Amino acid sequence: MAQAYRTEPDSDGHEHGRPEPRLRSLARQLRTHRGPWRRGLVLAALALLLALVMAGHARIPNSVGSLGSLGETFLPWLGLALPVLLVAGLVRRSATALIALLLPAVVWLNLFGGLVTDKSATGGDLTVATHNVNADNPDPAATARDLAASGADVVALEELSPEAVPAFREALAATYPHHAVEGTVGLWSKYPLSATAPVDIKLGWTRALRSTVDTPSGPLAVYVAHLPSVRVKVDAGFTAGQRDSSAEALGLAIRGEELDRVVLLGDLNGTMNDRALSPVTSQMRSTQGAAGNGFGFSWPASFPMARIDQIMVQGVEPVSSWTLPRTASDHLPIAARISFG
């Protein structure tokens, strides 16, 4: 091994050269010189912690305030920490921090890199759309006209107030001659509906329905659902227990569906990353994830931060998926084109 020399006094006070192992010499230099490898150790630790949180998000427990689901709702936004750490590492001229930053960057790209590319295609047999229209919508007729102009063949609406239903019926009648309303959700279609019935999602009132749409390409089972809202409270954390129970009930209903072709439209108050929605997401595909362009965030409409409105399919192929222009609601409407194959 190559050696370095240092001088040490002997018992007579004279200095003599003494070989020093190279590794020990480097260690001594690291202790005494704050070079690019010693600077930014805190930044490097933060980068490794960020990678650990993103890679191990499924292990964050839900038992305390549903922290796991809360983190998974906004998981893509952790990527904003990457440029911050990059700039800090460059300012500190820290090689250690910059190399450590590669790990969370790779983890983020592994989780979400596929979403930032455009996977949409042309063609398809049917266009579906869904919109939480907001019970306090000040102009339901205008919202209905915007949805009709989207060109969708089937439109699902959530959070319908009894006062707004007549306005939606009137404004959508010319484009969608077939419709059904169950509780606070409704379905409007250009094609006949049959076997429409409420779906019990364990709430005590109706916020989900199931109907068969008789499309030119064959029958399609359509579920419309509005899962319970969630809140973030200081004393209780992420209050999602009722939503999670409803997700289990909805998943069971879809699992028992007799038709092979199924579409779920609705406001699920959760993202595809949220483990609590796995009773549904484990058996269906997200049209945005399979055929969208970008994250497709839908809420809040003023500054979308999460995709809690979903279009999911089973037995049909997603062709394209997108968000529609803002209406008077606090959610953005979303749409997808599907193929029956």
Image (cartoon, grey):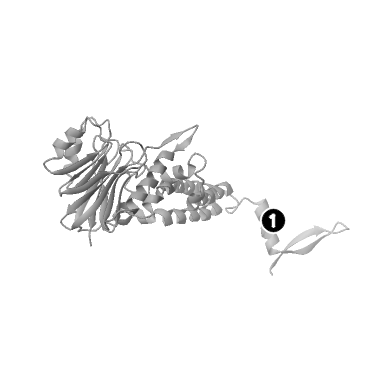
Front one among 280 and 22: 280
* Quadrant location of the C terminus in the rendered image: bottom left
Location of residue 339 with respect to 208 vertically, above or below: below
Where is residue 249 drawn, in percent x and y?
Answer: 37, 46
Front one among 171 and 209: 209
Q: Does residue 318 appear to the left or right of 15 in the view shown?
A: left
Front one among 162 and 137: 162
Where is residue 114 drawn, in percent x and y?
Answer: 36, 56
In which quadrant of the rendered view does residue 209 lie?
top left
Where is residue 291 drawn, in percent x and y?
Answer: 29, 56
> Which residue is at 50% across, 46% downward?
88
- Residue 333 visible to an observer of this rendering: no
Type of residue at label 1?
Arg
> Which residue is at 18% across, 36% downward?
168
User: In the image as oriented, which residue stretches furthest toward the left?
Assistant: 174
User: In the image as oriented, which residue stretches furthest toward the bottom?
Assistant: 1
Where is residue 122 drawn, in percent x and y?
Answer: 21, 58
Q: Give the class, few, some or many, for how many residues have Cα within 10 Å of label 1's Cα (few <14, many ≥20).
A: few
User: In the image as oriented, which residue stretches furthest toward the right?
Assistant: 12
* Quadrant location of the N terminus in the rendered image: bottom right
Residue marked by disc 1: 28
> Which residue is at 40% across, 50% downward?
278
Mark 1 secondary-structure assignment: helix
